[in-house]
């Protein structure tokens, strides 16, 4: 079957609520009968509730159990996708652990890095080999993920021609260890754990794009990070007194859906952090 006629297969992680749920809703609407959209959830009951909500809107997402914090869970999803479909067209790595204001960073950082950074890497390791021609692989990051938010002394950990995905994960583990031992500030890491984490995610996308460059470009595959802007979700609400300027999840999802459904002929954005449909500067 030609690439344009084949059923499109999409997966969004962390999709039982917040932005992820809106992404599944939008992908179901855009792909319609010609697509299968997997609503990735680590919790079956919450996933079922989200699926039923969308069913009530006339949409037909499929549930997919996935905990991005676990190698085996992510690999099982890749195995299931391979067995059922042979490949995948759209992957949105959206799942993220929240940061609690009431818990010291030292107690949150390891889980945060495991979910948000190592989880992104697990998704790359397991799902990138399944990408079909013209696939779109998106990591939901943030404009905090620009290297300019990091002290220059730390830039080599996330930037450079020889940088590897493994080295980025190691840098994130070093960061987590520094937070736990109380040495992060003296090593010039930012206070807020979301900043190094998002930089690590964007750096990983850049390395993935660079490593895959020849093949991805030949096969029309686009890999990007995306910033949804401030979104009104249970994750962001505790951090802002005034959410009047925040987008609803459905509003914020629109530009990400655009990125995820760029037509086969699109050659850019590629390897970028994209916000409002435009690349943000890395440095
Ligand atoms: N909200 C904003 O203003 C904003 C701004 C910039 C970027 N972002 C990014 O947008 C993405 C979504 O944010 P959000 O505000 O929608 O967050 P959210 O409401 O907290 O949703 C996060 C989702 O990730 C899931 N999740 C957490 N740990 C997981 C794991 N180990 N495996 C699989 N799923 C897991 C959660 O599942 P449970 O329901 O089971 O906890 C939930 O479904 C994140 O990457 C975030 O960093 C958000």
Image (cartoon, rainbow, N blue to C red):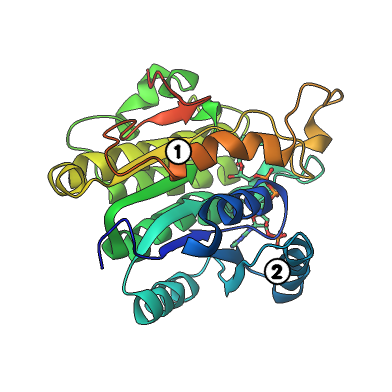
Give the side of residue 161 with respect to residue 120, left or right.
left
Residue 250's x, y, as percent?
69, 41
| Residue drawn where x is 42% and y is 30% of the image | 273
Q: Secondary structure at mark 2?
A: helix
Residue 88's x, y, as percent?
37, 63
N-terminal-most mark, 1 or 2: 2
Asked if 269 appears above or below 53 in the picture, the reply is: above
Give the Cα separation between the discs numbered 1 and 2.
24 Å
Q: Nearer the viewer, residue 237 or 87?
A: 87
Foreground label between 1 and 2: 1
Instruction: State whether label 1 is within 8 Å of ligand 1.
Output: no
Q: Nearer the viewer, residue 70 or 46?
A: 46
Q: Nearer the viewer, residue 85 or 103?
A: 85
Residue 163's x, y, as percent?
23, 39
Q: Identify residue for label 1.
A: 259
| Residue drawn where x is 72% and y is 30% of the image | 247
Give the side of residue 24 with respect to residue 247, left or right.
left
Task: Judge the density around disc 1: few (<14), some (14-19), many (≥20) Cα neighbours within 10 Å.
Answer: many
Quadrant of the rendered image containing residue 254: top right
Q: Identify residue for label 2.
A: 47
Question: What's the mark number on residue 246?
Answer: none
Which quadrant holds the C terminus? top left
| Residue drawn where x is 59% and y is 71% of the image | 62
Residue 179's x, y, as percent?
57, 41
Instruction: State whether label 2 is within 8 Å of ligand 1.
Output: no
Count of marks placed on residues: 2
Question: Is residue 252 among what the camera can see?
Answer: yes
């Amino acid at each position: 079957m030609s690439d344009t006629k084949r059923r499109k297969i999409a997966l969004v992680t962390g999709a039982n609520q917040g932005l992820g749920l809106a992404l599944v809703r939008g992908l179901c609407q855009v792909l319609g009968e010609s697509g299968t959209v997997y609503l990735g959830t680590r919790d079956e009951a919450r996933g079922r509730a989200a699926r039923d909500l969308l069913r009530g809107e006339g949409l037909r997402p499929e549930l997919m159990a996935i905990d991005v914090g676990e190698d085996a869970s992510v690999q099982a999803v890749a195995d299931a996708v391979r067995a059922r479909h042979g490949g995948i067209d759209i992957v949105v790595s959206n799942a993220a652990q929240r940061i609690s204001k009431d818990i010291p960073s030292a107690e949150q950082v390891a889980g945060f890095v495991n979910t948000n950074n190592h989880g992104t890497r697990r998704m790359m390791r397991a799902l990138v080999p399944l990408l079909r021609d013209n696939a779109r692989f998106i990591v939901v990051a943030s404009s905090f993920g620009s290297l300019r938010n990091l002290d220059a002394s730390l830039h080599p950990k996330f930037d450079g021609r020889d940088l590897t995905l493994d080295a980025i994960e190691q840098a994130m583990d070093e960061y987590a260890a520094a937070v736990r031992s109380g040495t992060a500030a003296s090593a010039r890491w930012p206070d807020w754990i979301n900043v190094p984490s998002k930089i690590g995610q964007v750096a990983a996308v850049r390395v993935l794009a660079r490593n895959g460059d020849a093949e991805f470009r030949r096969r029309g595959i686009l890999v990007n990070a995306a910033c949804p802007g401030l979104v009104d979700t249970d994750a962001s609400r505790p951090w802002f007194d005034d959410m009047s300027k925040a987008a609803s999840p459905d509003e914020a999802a629109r530009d990400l859906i655009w990125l995820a459904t760029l037509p086969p002929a699109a050659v850019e954005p590629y390897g970028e952090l994209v916000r409002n449909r435009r690349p943000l500067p890395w440095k």
